[in-house]
Image (cartoon, rainbow, N blue to C red):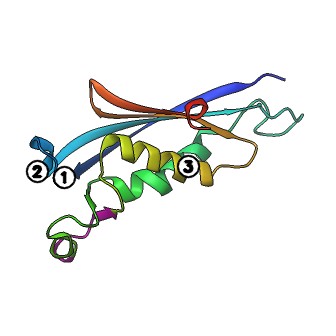
Amino acid sequence: MSIIRITKEFRFEGAHALTDYDGKCRHIHGHSYRLFVTLKGTPLHEANHPKSGMVLDFSELKSIVNKLIVDPFDHALILRKDARLVDEIMAAYQNVVVVEFQPTCENLTVYFAGLIQKNLPEILELQSIKLYETPTSFVEWVKEDNK
């Protein structure tokens, strides 16, 4: 049996502000995020099964990640729960995601990894996540580093 890694790329737009940060990122600003999700598993080997030879149908991975990450975070403003004016902003705008943590690329990556891990079929492992905040800057979460 071969162990295979599959990766799918996702894209979404988002804005955030880093509460109490000492640089420009303390202001509301946006990113064109690129998310790469890599799973590890063994391809299904069942004669006459429509998914034979697949670790997971890419459309199933797309469905999981869209539901958990892309749909709620696309074109959203992401703020820490104790950010100034968070209640007023939530009352004035519809697509505001409030999180318990500073919404840095690093923290979002760890958060996304946890969401995906909890919602995968048990036969699969989340191997890594790579989240690009800009075309030249990304954060990577790798399972072997987080045991």
Instruction: Identify the residue at horizontal 90%, vertical 34% (top origin).
Output: 47
Within-10-Å neighbours for mark 3: few <14, some 14–19, many 20+: some
Within-10-Å neighbours for mark 1: few <14, some 14–19, many 20+: many
Q: Earlier in the sequence, mark 1 or mark 2?
A: 1
Q: Earlier in the sequence, mark 3 or mark 1?
A: 1
Dots 3, 1 in contact, CB < 8 A = no
Q: Secondary structure at mark 3?
A: helix
- For label 3, the residue is 116
What kind of residue is marked 1? Ala
- In the image, the segment drawn in magenta is 91-98
Camera-nearest label, 2 or 3: 2
Dots 1, 2 in contact, CB < 8 A = yes
What kind of residue is marked 3? Ile
Kindly report the distance in space between the C-alpha atoms of the residues bearing marks 3 and 1: 24 Å
Residue 54 pos. (x, y %): 72, 33
- Name the foreground residue: 2 vs 85: 85
Q: How many marks?
A: 3
Residue 19 pos. (x, y %): 19, 55
Give the numbered dot on residue 6: none
- For label 2, the residue is 27
Residue 36 pos. (x, y %): 46, 33
- For label 1, the residue is 17
Kindly report the distance in space between the C-alpha atoms of the residues bearing marks 2 and 3: 29 Å
Q: Quadrant of residue 145?
A: top right
Instruction: Identify the residue at horizontal 15%, vertical 44% (top origin).
Output: 25
- Name the foreground residue: 111 vs 55: 111
Camera-nearest label, 3 or 1: 1
Q: Is residue 77 left or right of residue 110?
A: left
Residue 131 pos. (x, y %): 39, 36
